[in-house]
Amino acid sequence: MPDKNNAFPDLLSGPILRKLEASQINLWLVTSKPFHIRLLIDNAYLTPKVRNIQACDNLCFVLIEGLPDTPFPVDEWVNYTI
């Protein structure tokens, strides 16, 4: 939901799936402010490494790296929720 003090919506672009391998998932978001992220993949929460890069007042690139406890399935759909 947009912040009443900010004319921009929270999410400007994404999520963009940058990389998916059995050992990791990388996603990008473009937001109007930094965020703490929770990542749900195939009904299991991961604690992702999140890097917020503030480009200007209302532009932040959010780089997300999720490392699963067990490898992701290969050659199957992997459902994710941010």
Image (cartoon, rainbow, N blue to C red):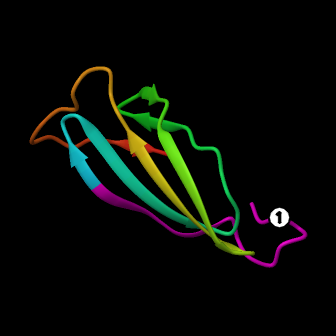
- Left or right placement of residue 82 versus residue 60 in this view: left
Q: Give the residue displayed 33% in from the left and 58% down from the top.
A: 17
Label 1 Cα crowd, 10 Å radius (few <14 / some 14-19 / many 20+) = few
Residue 59: x and y in percent read 64, 74
Q: Nearer the viewer, residue 14 or 57?
A: 57
Q: Nearer the viewer, residue 57 or 20?
A: 57
Q: Secondary structure at mark 1?
A: loop
Q: Give the residue displayed 44% in from the left and 60% down from the top.
A: 28
- Left or right placement of residue 1 versus residue 48 in this view: right
Query: Magenta includes 14?
Result: yes
- Left or right placement of residue 11 versus residue 8 in this view: left
Q: Give the residue displayed 81% in from the left and 78% down from the top.
A: 7
Residue range in magenta is: 1-18
Q: Give the residue displayed 24% in from the left and 48% down from the top.
A: 20
Query: Magenta includes 76?
Result: no
Residue 21: x and y in percent read 19, 43
Residue under pointer 1: 3
- Left or right placement of residue 47 versus residue 77 in this view: right
